[in-house]
Image: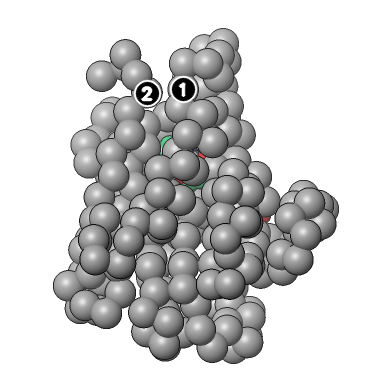
Amino acid sequence: MPTALITGASRGLGAEIARQLAPTHDLLLGGRPSPELDRLATELDGASTFAVDLTDYDEVEAAVEAISELDVLVHNAGVSSSLEPVAETPVEEWQHVLEVNLIAVAELTRLLLPALRAAGGHVVFINSGAGRRVNPGWTPYAASKFGVRALADGLRAEEPGLRVTSVFPGRIDTDMQRDIVAIEGDDYDGSRFLRPATVARAVVQAVHTPADAHPEEIVLRPTGRG
Ligand SMILES: NC(=O)c1ccc[n+]([C@@H]2O[C@H](COP(=O)([O-])OP(=O)(O)OC[C@H]3O[C@@H](n4cnc5c(N)ncnc54)[C@H](OP(=O)(O)O)[C@@H]3O)[C@@H](O)[C@H]2O)c1
């Protein structure tokens, strides 16, 4: 079976992508060490964990050493930002969001490129609606996602032997969205948002696209919400 590494697989969208890729792929489940990650590995019989903090680059380099061929890399791990306006965003917030959402993604890509090239692999970047337009309060998060879009476009141009897909979902019913709605001061109603399983399905469909086609971008909005 081909091998897939999914970052941020401990919960939310990443866990759903893992469940849907499990029938067709040997899985490496990314996430910081946690009981949730171990539970998912047990649930998906035969899956291994890739349990590192992606911003600990020495640990990431050591973990990548064992991977000689990689068919699919799904960059899903990410953090939201505090929704402060630019005028009130401290430098530490910029550093944290850009580090997790962009720099760690670039470094993991770099470290895995030999394994991806060896397999003629497919790299999927989970971007966001915020990677296409910026709303007030979303500037640091959007900057990180605009950056990830540039990373994906550059990688696609530089590595013609790979397929590179950017997925731009609107709001998804996950822990991250609960935190965002709490900051916005609204009641949480998950039914207003995309279901993780629906977004995962689009990701898996991109992965299963026959090799003659290159799915470059996928945009998903919650139906009826513009
Ligand atoms: N939710 C939305 O509305 C929405 C909309 C558009 C796009 N997205 C994007 O979709 C992706 C998944 O989001 P989600 O909503 O599923 O988020 P989530 O429920 O908050 O889960 C985030 C995942 O990222 C992992 N992660 C965070 N920081 C990490 C680090 N330093 N090292 C390793 N893993 C780390 C977490 O692992 P731990 O368990 O170790 O914390 C967790 O598995 C993100 O890229 C997000 O930007 C989300």
Q: Residue at x 25, y 50 (%)?
A: 217
Q: Is residue 97 in view from this perspective? A: no
Q: N-terminal of the two: label 1 or label 2?
A: 1
Q: Residue at x 31, y 53 (%)?
A: 166
In the displayed structure, 150 sits above or below 19; it is below
- The residue wearing badge 1 is 193
- The colour style of the image is one colour
User: Would residue 163 be found to the left or right of residue 33 on screen?
Assistant: left
Q: Quadrant of the N terminus?
A: bottom right
Q: Residue at x 57, y 33 (%)?
A: 174
Residue 164, image x, y percentages:
30, 64
Question: Is 71 or 109 nearer to us in this picture?
Answer: 71
Q: Amino acid at mark 2?
A: Pro
Classify mark 1 as within 8 Å of ligand 1 or not, answering yes or no: yes
Q: Residue at x 51, y 84 (%)?
A: 69
Neighbour class for label 2 at 10 Å: few (<14), some, many (≥20)? some
Q: Is residue 20 in view from this perspective? A: yes
Neighbour class for label 1 at 10 Å: few (<14), some, many (≥20)? some
Residue 95, image x, y percentages:
43, 58
Residue 5, image x, y percentages:
55, 67
- The residue wearing badge 2 is 222
Residue 96, image x, y percentages:
48, 55
Question: Is 27 or 185 nearer to us in this picture?
Answer: 27
Question: Is 119 or 68 nearer to us in this picture?
Answer: 119
Q: Which element type, helix, strand or loop, lies under badge 1?
A: loop
Q: Quadrant of residue 118?
A: bottom left
Question: Do the residues under discs 1 and 2 have CB atoms within 8 angstroms?
Answer: yes
Q: Which element type, helix, strand or loop, lies under badge 2?
A: loop
